[in-house]
Amino acid sequence: MTGSDRRNAIVERIRNSNVPVSGKALASEFDVSRQVIVQDIALIRAAGHDIISTNRGYIINEPYSAKRVFKVRHTDEELEEELNAIVDLGGKVCNVIVNHRVYGRLEAELNITSRRKVAEFIADIKNGKSSPLKNITSDYHYHTVEADSEDTLDLIGEMLRKKGFLIET
């Protein structure tokens, strides 16, 4: 395992732990010395990760978020229902993506996190500021959705399936 791979694995190990992870445990797990772990932590911090040393070990000060891309299809009239279904279950609609046969992949940032933001987005569409990107691909499109856990993303997927929006390939 390279140093870079080990540092990535250390970040994931700390991020996925519910308790602080000791340097001794990391050294044992990655078969390196405690001093190598200290140096790796310094490099990880320099790369922008907020790793905090406590008397019980290392923790990461980053909110964890799970992400998943959902392929969906719905009418213009169902757009608000689709977005509300996602945010009501705790999801953030990060973007919309379409794969156009001529232009390729087109993506627009949305960052919709609440019913209020859904309403603002729908109002912009209805006021003629723009039309939904999905309209150029026969309503087929993708959303990257972020949530606090994989379980939440599973619930969102089930709701989209139940409403008939989810396209499963």
Image (cartoon, rainbow, N blue to C red):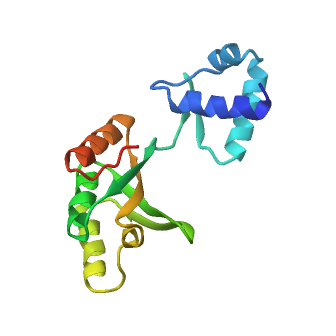
For the N terminus, the quadrant is top right
**Is residue 102 positioned above or below 144 on the image?**
below
Where is residue 3 shown, x and y percent of the image?
78, 31
Does residue 159 appear in the picture of this structure? Answer: yes
**Is residue 1 positioned above or below 47 on the image?**
above
For the C terminus, the quadrant is top left
**Is residue 42 positioned above or below 93 on the image?**
above
Does residue 53 appear in the picture of this structure? Answer: no
Q: Is residue 62 left or right of residue 34?
A: left
Of residue 86 and residue 28, the one placed in the foreground of this image is 86
The residue lying at 31 percent from left, 86 percent from top is: 128
Of residue 159 and residue 5, the one placed in the foreground of this image is 159
The residue lying at 72 percent from left, 32 percent from top is: 5
Where is residue 120 shown, x and y percent of the image?
27, 74
The residue lying at 69 percent from left, 39 percent from top is: 44
Where residue 57 sits, quadrant-wise, is top right
Where is residue 157 shown, x and y percent of the image?
31, 43
Of residue 100 and residue 30, the one placed in the foreground of this image is 100
Where is residue 124 shown, x and y percent of the image?
30, 80
The residue lying at 46 percent from left, 44 percent from top is: 63
Where residue 151 sits, quadrant-wise, is top left
